[in-house]
Amino acid sequence: MQMVQSLQPGDNEQRIGFCEDMLRRLDGNDDQLNNLWMSDEAPPRTIKPSSNASRRRWSNIGQYAA
């Protein structure tokens, strides 16, 4: 099962407002686009406790490095 965010009443107006605001900010300021960072990533949520087997450790240093 995958959890997703559902659209709510009023979301369309907020989306349009966001787009209009971003267009206003970008109008005549091409460098502004270089400062924009967006992500659709969300922190993971679990319904039940998960095991450590499904977790990954990301590091430049090995787990057993002294």
Image (tube, rainbow, N blue to C red):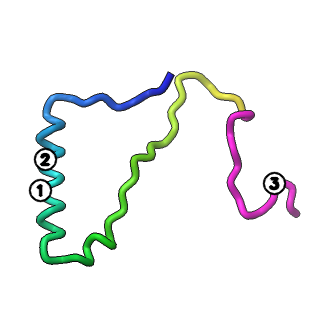
Q: Are marks 2 and 1 in contact (CB under 8 Å)?
A: yes
- Amino acid under label 3? Gln
In the rendered image, which quarter contains the C terminus? bottom right
Question: x%, y% of residue 47?
Answer: 53, 23
- Answer with left or right where residue 53 lies relative to residue 37: right
| Image disc number at residue 62 | none
- Amino acid under label 1? Glu
Give the main secondary structure, helix, strand or loop, of the magenta stretch. Answer: loop
Instruction: Say what secondary structure mark 3 lies in.
Output: loop
Q: Tell me where the magenta segment starts and ends, as one range.
A: 52-66
First-in-chain label (3 vs 2) = 2
Who's the residue at 25% across and 30% down the image? 7
- Amino acid under label 2? Ile
| Image disc number at residue 63 | 3
Who's the residue at 48% across and 26% down the image? 2
Residue designated by label 2? 16
Residue designated by label 1? 20
Residue 8 against residue 21 in the figure, above or below = above
Is label 3 or label 2 in front? 2
- Answer with left or right where residue 10 lies relative to residue 39: left
Who's the residue at 39% across and 30% down the image? 4
